[in-house]
């Protein structure tokens, strides 16, 4: 399903511009021809921390960079960026970043805190799947927020796919139950479940989420369930703590980092994989439908540093 074209790379570059500028401008400004690297390295470290790579990882990267640069007689910006890029890539996972693909129904559940981009990411994912000739159905399991059902119904109309829904305030898990039955009966490849935004410490809503997941696991093979955590990239380390809490409480097997176009904190993508060891599957780099992009470590790091 993942094809990379120049167009996609251009979109990543545009989406990561703020992060790129933050890191490269700092380094571009400070690299002199002198042999005293220590001060420069400290500024690089600061730039990495400001990009939300996290203090520990930034220090770790710097240590490796320092020892690699010390082996060189002369250093230029390209050396620094190339070596830094290679070091960062080693902190990203080798695992598959594709959405699960099975012979029977795959259910993808979009979870996360309020306003992170769950519903629009769901719609973008539906479009990608439709473009790969998959049969897709949607479930409106956010019965909580005002206008949430209308929002996903509208996407259903635009994409010309069925939306299974209930009433506001009704049991989200029972809508999931009906939706899975319906998707199975209609031989769908994917059912995409929209859920309400919630904080990990909202006990009632977390119980509701667990119930939806329990129902999915009862009705499809456990390995056919994709629990995607949608993280707002502009919230940086805060979002990271939410991802960790959700991961501990309901288990997640993929992460989508959205709104990277609006932040210089793109380093969070690397920090999150390094620390949670859960693959980032997609990144959101804008509001257009084409702006949800399969995460590719090489493209990402090139766009960040070059
Ligand atoms: N700039 C930018 N905006 C985005 C991106 N992804 C989503 N958004 C915007 O974020 C806003 C919130 O998106 P929703 O999909 O409604 O978020 P949600 O998580 O479903 O929100 P709740 O259901 O209220 O919890 C919308 O205006 C989206 O267009 C992105 O990658 N870049
Ligand atoms: Mg929503």
Image: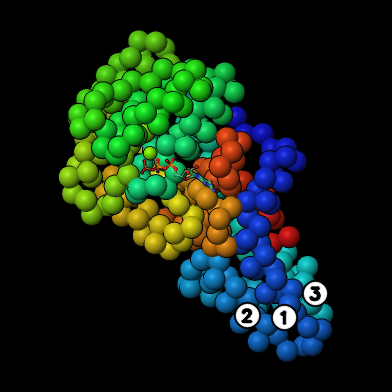
Question: Of the numbered discs in the image, which one, if any, rests on residue 30?
Answer: 1
Is residue 301 in view from this perspective?
Answer: no
Judged from the image, the secondary structure of the residue bearing numbered disc 3 is loop
Query: In the image, what residue occupies the spot 31% across and 50% down?
Result: 246
Position in image of residue 99 (x %, y %): 49, 33
| Mark 1 and mark 2 residues within 8 Å of each other at the beta carbon | yes
Q: Position of residue 79 (x, y in %)?
A: 76, 69
Please state, as top left, top right, bottom left or bottom right, where the N terminus lies in the image: top right
Residue designated by label 2: 43
Q: Residue at x 48, y 68 (%)?
A: 54
**Residue visible at 68% across and 41% down in the picture:** 8
Q: Check whether the beta carbons of the residues at disc 3 and disc 1 lie within 8 A of each other.
A: no
Relative horizontal placement of residue 305, taking residue 234 as reference (left or right):
right
Question: Which one is earlier in the sequence, the residue at label 2 or at label 3?
Answer: 2
- Looking at marks 3 and 1 on the same chain, the residue that comes earlier in the sequence is marked by 1
Give percent across and percent down for residue 229: 40, 45
The secondary structure type at the circle numbered 1 is helix
- Which residue is label 3 attached to? 76
């Amino acid at each position: 399903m993942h094809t990379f074209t120049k167009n996609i790379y251009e979109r990543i570059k545009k989406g990561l511009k703020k992060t790129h500028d933050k890191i490269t401008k700092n380094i571009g400004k400070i690299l002199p021809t002198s042999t005293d690297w220590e001060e420069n390295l400290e500024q690089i470290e600061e730039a990495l921390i400001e990009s939300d790579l996290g203090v520990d990882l930034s220090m770790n990267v710097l240590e490796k960079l320092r020892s690699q640069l010390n082996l060189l007689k002369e250093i230029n910006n390209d050396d620094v960026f190339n070596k830094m890029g290679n070091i960062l890539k080693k902190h990203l996972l080798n695992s598959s970043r594709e959405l699960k693909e099975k012979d029977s129904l795959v259910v993808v559940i979009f979870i996360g805190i309020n306003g992170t981009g769950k519903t629009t990411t769901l719609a973008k994912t539906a479009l990608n799947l439709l473009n790969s000739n998959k049969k897709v159905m949607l479930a409106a399991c956010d019965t909580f927020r005002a206008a949430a059902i209308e929002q996903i119904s509208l996407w259903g109309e635009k994409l010309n796919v069925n939306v299974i829904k209930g009433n506001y305030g009704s049991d989200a898990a029972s809508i999931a139950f009906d939706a899975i039955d319906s998707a199975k009966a209609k031989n769908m490849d994917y059912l995409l479940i929209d859920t309400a935004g919630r904080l990990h410490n909202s006990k009632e809503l977390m119980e509701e989420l667990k119930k939806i997941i329990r129902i999915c696991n009862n009705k499809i093979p456990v390995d056919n369930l994709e629990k995607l955590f949608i993280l707002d990239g502009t919230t940086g380390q805060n979002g990271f703590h939410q991802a960790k809490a959700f991961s501990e409480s309901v288990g997640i097997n993929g992460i989508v980092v959205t709104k990277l176009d609006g932040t210089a904190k793109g380093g969070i993508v690397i920090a999150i994989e390094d620390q949670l060891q859960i693959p980032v599957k997609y990144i959101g780099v804008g509001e257009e439908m084409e702006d949800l992009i399969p995460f590719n470590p090489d493209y990402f790091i090139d766009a960040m540093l070059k």
